[in-house]
Image (cartoon, helix red, strand yellow):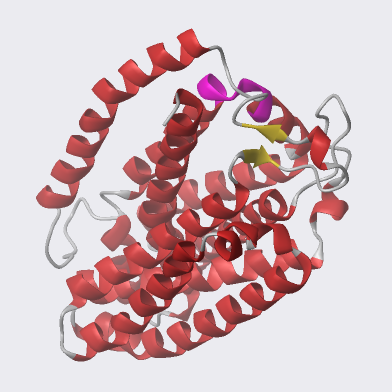
Amino acid sequence: MDLNTTWFILVAVLLAGYAILDGFDLGVGILHLFIKGDTERRLAMNAIGPVWDGNEVWLVTGGGALFAAFPEVYASAFSGFYTALMLLLVTLIFRAVAIEFRSKRPSPRWRQGWDIAFAAGSFGAALLMGVAFGNVAAGVPMDADHNITAGLLGLLNPYALLVGVTTVVLFAMHGAIYLVLKTDGEVQAQVRRWVRPLIIAFVICYALTTAATLLWQQHLAARMFAQPVWFLVPVLTVLAVANVPREIFHGREFRAFLSSCAAIGLLVTLIGVGLYPNLLLAGNDPANSLTIVNGASSQKTLWIMLVIAIIGMPIVLAYTTVVYWVFRGKVRLEKSSY
């Protein structure tokens, strides 16, 4: 396996890590307005309170890895998706500020306003990320200089929107499972009732997205038909999702959460398998696509970055593990709580 492929996998791992970790954060936010009661909403928000900002480090790290390893891809994607990325930044800012400011005053109107900001920011971020992944998977119009020629409205095509909706439902399901794991009492009872309907909604969205992919984005399935062993990925995804209600029923919330994490990781793997060796596919002319070869840094740069990654990744993993270990168990409200 060459350096270019190694970095393709590393970037995919970082993005998968972000989707798994910040996915449940966003899911909790998406469900926030459906939770009844001020104390119950505070409990839900504090379930992610100690970890949400650390989870977003994975997005920053993934962006940094993409910039260092595939600068041409980074430049084309960030210039072509500029408006969408600014909207994404706004949603993430509103979400972060809402978490910090919500409980600063006891006023019900104040808290309701920040509740709406938290939910809207989480929903908007999940939708925009899904739309971005949908466009990357389907391909975007690019000229010979690798400039994306589509505007914001052009990026809001039916396939990308379908992937965006699927992402919202997936994160909502993931967040609900996390809340069942981290809470008890009334909050857990409320959220537990949502898990099965959200699983059903995700399976429907996943089936529709798969059908749309086979009909209109056949390049994503070409590798699986050429090498049927890759069909294991969608099969394992369905099995992982199907295992969630089983574990919830038996009271094994942690296993249910691990199954949800596995499903998200497998979905990112599925997109990676379909795209490889492309990183930014030109839908209008495949010759204009950015691949792991023409979009990469020099071999020396990739080697240096690989050494840094080998040193840095264990530190990031250790930090993440320690944080989750320290804040394990059911969430409780204290004076320092949000």
Q: At 44% across and 53% down in the image, what residue appears? A: 19
Relative to 16, residue 261 above or below: below
Q: At 38% across and 72% down in the image, what residue appears? A: 236
Which region of the structure is painted magenta? Answer: 67-73
Note whether residue 56 is visible.
no
What secondary structure predominates along the stretch shown in magenta?
Answer: helix
Query: In x, y percent, where is residue 36?
Result: 40, 82
Image quadrant where one finds the C terminus? bottom left
User: Left of 279 or right of it: where is 199?
Assistant: left
Nearer-the-camera pick, 90 or 260? 260
Nearer-the-camera pick, 8 or 85? 8
Residue 253 belongs to the span the image colors magenta? no
Q: At 45% across and 26% down in the image, what residue appears? A: 2
Note whether residue 284 is visible.
yes
Query: In x, y percent, where is residue 175?
Result: 38, 69
Q: At 18% across and 70% down in the image, what residue appears? A: 254
Query: In x, y percent, where is residue 149?
Result: 89, 38
Relative to 253, residue 220 above or below: above
